[in-house]
Image (cartoon, rainbow, N blue to C red):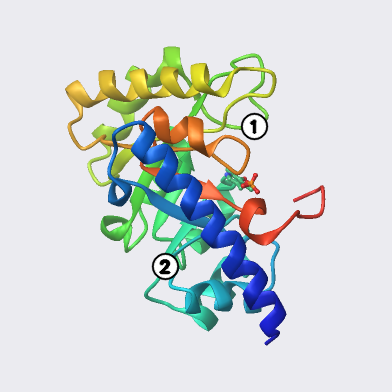
Amino acid sequence: MSSERKEELAENLRKVKDRIADAASDSGRKIDEITLVVVTKTFPVSDTQILHELGERNFGENRNEEGLAKKELVDPHAIWHFQGQIQSKKIRHITQWANVIHSLDSVDHAQKFAHAENVKDLKFFLQVNLEPSRDDRGGVSIARLPDFLDEVAALGSINIIGFMSVAPLGVDPKEAFQEVAKAKNLAQKNYPSITQLSMGMSGDFEEAIKCGATHIRIGSSILGSRPAQA
Ligand SMILES: *Cc1c(COP(=O)(O)O)cnc(C)c1O
């Protein structure tokens, strides 16, 4: 394992954590309200291992084979976050390694998760789409949220803990995140378990923290840039 890579990752991690601390203190929030999910997707197991040695315990992945392999090789007891688009036929596989699903956006998928043996151990974020004209990136529109929540709640076993969103391109991320936070506060009135906000990536996590994010998903600021298709 390269000690140069370890130094590089440690340095990047330290910088990101300093920025998280600054954004939290600027907005009067406590740092322990914010979970850093290190998005290790596409990076080798060795990088995930290094980040684990550096103390990280929340990892984000979006491919089954990769998520399962890293969980087994790095730490089955760490918290593994799935945040890619869900495909029906992969759901059973996702439940074999992921602890937290950030991208639930279909009642049909929720039904399939509800049949998983370990559904009680899974936590779900509902993905909110702020760009209804573009559904190719996944997510439930703000307008459909109330019905969606009722339909998923009727299944009984799906534990939705909050909302996840990706700020659309060309929109001020602050406005986007405020809209998601507002939708969360509204939903929480009917569904008190909805308390968490997964929002903020390398380019906009400080804004997200200021808008109440509880989970920020950071890849490239810690690991470096990924190949374009990932
Ligand atoms: C890849 C990905 C991230 C991490 O993005 P960076 O810009 O590298 O920090 C976060 N969230 C989702 C949904 C992703 O697909």
Residue 30 lies in quadrant: top left
Question: Which residue carries the number 1 mark?
Answer: 137
Q: Amino acid at mark 2?
A: Arg
Of residue 70 and residue 43, the one placed in the foreground of this image is 43
Query: Which residue is painted at 43% across and 72% down in the image?
Result: 55
Mark 1, other Cα within 10 Å: few <14 / some 14–19 / many ≥20: few
Of all residues, the one furthest to the right in this rendering is 228
Left or right of 169? Residue 182 is left
Of residue 45 and residue 112, the one placed in the foreground of this image is 45
x, y (%) of residue 61? 57, 58
Question: Which residue carries the number 2 mark?
Answer: 57
Mark closer to the observer (1, 2): 2
State the SS at label 1: loop
Query: Which residue is painted at 69% across and 66% down in the image?
Result: 43
x, y (%) of residue 197? 37, 36
Between discs 1 and 2, the one toward the N terminus: 2
Question: Mark number for residue 4?
Answer: none
Of residue 150 and residue 163, the one placed in the foreground of this image is 163
- Res. 22 visible in picture: yes
Against 79, is 103 above or below?
Answer: above
Q: Amino acid at mark 1?
A: Arg
State the SS at label 2: loop
Query: Which residue is painted at 50% across and 46% down in the image?
Result: 19
x, y (%) of residue 230? 74, 51
Quarter the N terminus occupies? bottom right
Measured Cα–Cα span from mark 1 to mark 2: 27 Å
Of all residues, the one furthest to the bottom in this rendering is 1
x, y (%) of residue 206? 50, 36
